[in-house]
């Protein structure tokens, strides 16, 4: 691979914003990709993938480069040189790379890789927490898996097409996909591609959704004609899956505390041809109370640490703090108690997170069931990335007794 100056400059500019100004990596990358209209898909791919790669391995590369935050522009160039050297890319004769100690970089990589928290490029507290909750052996496998690049996975929108038709349409666009027997609506891209620019996406024939996330809606045992409440709907990935499973029959009430996310859900629902979704903004507790004892099924896709989705959000490793985890566990507990009251007698509830920590998952369900209520656990499922090859997730199906 040959490095191009303008692409490298863009990447360095982006990393300075992410590391020093706390900007979100996905937002920065979106802006960078609009920087030069002459860039082709390969150029944009280089900027996006290199930026995410250096964000993912920030601690390791900084230790090898012997630089500390806040990083200067020269520090970022040193980290860039480490990235390129470890990838086997020949450094061009630019002033930023003068005196780069190639042999020392490889030697320091070998030495530092003996320490898991540096090798896996995570904060000390996160490593300690992972060991405490999952055990040393499982955590080592899991954090290694969570540092791999996520595959692009589509969920076929069965309201508009079939898996066979979509697979053929994408093949005609030179986008090859594979199926997976355990995920009936999933198509996995063989090579990364910008699927959002395709006509089939604009027509609403699919959504991009990780395979583990695609397990949540079916876990709820819903049927067409039911009244379902998606309590933390966000922009609606799982809401749209529910709508497809219900064949547009019945009602899905999509709740969220963020109105702008519900506006995005409306836009996506229109593209998907999902007509049975009613977004409602939670602007007061009245919105919740009005639904007490009214729902056949309730989905609580709870706010969480997001540790299960580090593959696609590597920047969250550096934003997440132990204090946030303490607060979010409290929020999860309160949400379970409050939102479960929407389930009518005989109805069901799914509590789900994109975390791999038992303290956000099994422990929360146990705590909820230990309180006076009418619920019992039917089944639960923990998905570890190191076992599934996809995102880490948890889901529990609870029944309210009649």
Image (spheres, rainbow, N blue to C red):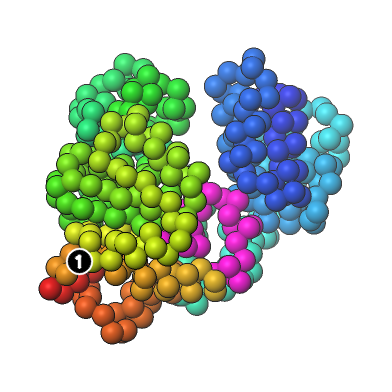
Report whether 388 appears left or right of 319. Answer: left
Crowding around mark 1 (Cα neighbors within 10 Å: few <14, some 14 to 19, many 20+) is many
Q: Which residues are magenta?
A: 302-325
Front-lying residue, 276 or 272? 276
Q: Is residue 258 above or below residue 138?
A: above
- Residue 348 is situated, as x and y percent measured from the top left of the image, at 21, 64
Answer with the quarter of the image where residue 40 lies: top right
SS under mark 1? strand
The reply to whether residue 358 is visible in this rendering is no
- Residue 229 lies in the magenta-colored region: no
- Residue 153 is situated, as x and y percent measured from the top left of the image, at 37, 39
Q: How many marks?
A: 1
Front-lying residue, 228 or 8? 228
- Residue 393 is situated, as x and y percent measured from the top left of the image, at 37, 59
Identify which residue is drawn at 60% across, 51% down.
315
Identify which residue is drawn at 17% across, 56% down.
221
Identify which residue is drawn at 19% across, 71% down.
400
Answer with the quarter of the image where residue 383 lies: bottom left
- The residue at which mark 1 appears reads as 344
**Which quadrant: the N terminus?**
top right
Report whether 323 appears left or right of 280. Answer: right
The reply to whether residue 373 is visible in this rendering is yes
Front-lying residue, 304 or 111? 304
- Residue 101 is situated, as x and y percent measured from the top left of the image, at 80, 44
**Which quadrant: the C terminus?**
bottom left
Identify which residue is drawn at 53% across, 49% down.
313
Q: Is residue 277 above or below residue 382?
A: above
Answer with the quarter of the image where residue 336 lies: bottom left
Front-lying residue, 359 or 174? 359
Report whether 21 appears left or right of 322. Answer: right
């Amino acid at each position: 691979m040959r490095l191009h100056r303008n692409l490298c400059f863009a990447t360095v500019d982006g990393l300075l914003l992410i590391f020093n100004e706390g900007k979100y990596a996905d937002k920065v990358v979106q802006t960078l990709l609009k920087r030069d209209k002459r860039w082709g898909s390969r150029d944009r791919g280089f900027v996006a993938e290199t930026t995410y790669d250096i964000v993912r391995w920030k601690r390791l590369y900084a230790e090898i480069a012997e630089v500390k935050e806040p990083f200067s522009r020269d520090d970022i160039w040193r980290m860039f040189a480490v990235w390129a050297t470890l990838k086997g890319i020949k450094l061009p004769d630019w002033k930023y790379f003068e005196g780069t100690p190639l042999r020392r970089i490889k030697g320091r990589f070998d030495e530092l890789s003996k320490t898991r928290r540096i090798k896996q490029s995570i904060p000390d507290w996160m490593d300690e927490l992972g060991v405490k909750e999952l055990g040393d052996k499982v955590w080592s496998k899991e954090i290694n898996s969570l540092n791999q690049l996520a595959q692009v996975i589509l969920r076929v929108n069965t309201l508009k097409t079939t898996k066979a038709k979509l697979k053929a349409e994408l093949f005609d666009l030179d986008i090859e996909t594979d199926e997976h027997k355990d995920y009936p609506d999933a198509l996995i891209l063989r090579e990364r591609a910008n699927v959002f620019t395709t006509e089939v996406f604009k027509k609403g024939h699919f959504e991009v959704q990780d395979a583990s996330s695609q397990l949540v809606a079916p876990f709820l045992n819903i049927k067409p004609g039911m009244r379902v409440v998606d309590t933390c709907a966000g922009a609606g990935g799982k809401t749209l899956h529910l709508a497809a499973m219900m064949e547009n029959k019945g009602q899905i009430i999509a709740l969220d505390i963020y109105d702008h996310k519900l506006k995005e859900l409306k836009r996506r629902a229109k593209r998907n041809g999902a007509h049975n979704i009613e977004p409602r903004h939670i602007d007061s507790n009245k919105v919740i109370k009005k639904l007490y004892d009214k729902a056949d099924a309730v989905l609580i896709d709870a706010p969480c640490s997001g540790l299960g989705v580090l593959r696609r959000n590597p920047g969250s490793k550096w934003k997440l703090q132990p204090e946030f985890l303490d607060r979010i566990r409290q929020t999860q507990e309160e949400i379970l108690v409050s939102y479960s009251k929407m389930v009518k007698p005989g109805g069901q509830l799914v509590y789900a997170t994109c975390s791999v920590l038992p303290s956000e998952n099994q422990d929360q369900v146990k705590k909820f069931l230990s309180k006076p209520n009418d619920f019992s656990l039917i089944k639960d499922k923990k998905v570890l990335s190191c076992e599934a090859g996809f995102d880490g997730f948890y889901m529990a199906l609870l029944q309210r007794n009649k």
